[in-house]
Amino acid sequence: MATTEDLRADLRRLVDQLPEGELHAARRFLEYLRCAGAPVLRAFTEAPLDDEPETEEERAAVEEARRDFAAGRVVTHEEVKRRVLGQA
């Protein structure tokens, strides 16, 4: 019986031997297999695109966040946990 390492090596060899025109199909299939066992990940990958237009308020909030980031006005994840949860 092949080990996981052996199986991965076989898969790499097969991928290396694929015709160039089949690489996109192989990638999509492998991504499908990766998500098949993860229902939450599958739900995200299969969710419809958000086609709701961005509001002016949302656009302004994003710009403000970009300015804050560029100016170094940021808080780390650890700092947020410390402040909110008393952790870290």
Image (cartoon, grey):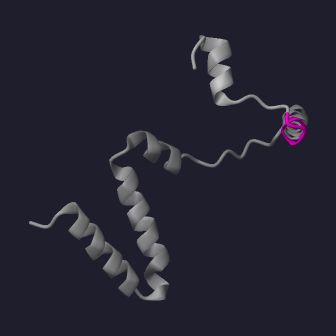
Residue 71's spot in the image, x, y percent? 90, 38
Look at the image and say whether residue 79 sits in the magenta stretch.
no
The dominant secondary structure in magenta is helix
Q: Residue at x 49, y 75 (%)?
A: 24
| Screen quadrant of the C terminus | top right
In this rendering, the answer to whether 48 lies above or below 32 is above
In this rendering, the answer to whether 8 lies above or below 83 is below
**Quarter of image, res 82:** top right
Along the line of sight, which residue is nearer the eye, 6 or 55?
6
Q: Residue at x 17, y 63 (%)?
A: 3
Along the line of sight, which residue is nearer the eye, 74 or 58?
74
Looking at the rendered structure, the number of numbered marks drawn on it comes to 0
In this rendering, the answer to whether 55 lies above or below 85 is below
Q: Relative to 11, is 81 on the left or the right? A: right
Residue 62's spot in the image, x, y percent? 84, 38
Q: Residue at x 40, y 59 (%)?
A: 32
Residue 7's spot in the image, x, y percent? 23, 68
| Screen quadrant of the N terminus | bottom left
Q: Relative to 42, is 53 on the left or the right? A: right
Residue 73's spot in the image, x, y percent? 85, 31
Q: Residue at x 22, y 69 (%)?
A: 6
**Quarter of image, res 22:** bottom left
Q: Relative to 18, is 46 on the left or the right? A: right
Q: Which residues are magenta?
A: 67-72
**Residue farthest along the left direction in this orientation:** 1
In this rendering, the answer to whether 64 lies above or below 36 is above
**Residue farthest along the top direction in this orientation:** 86
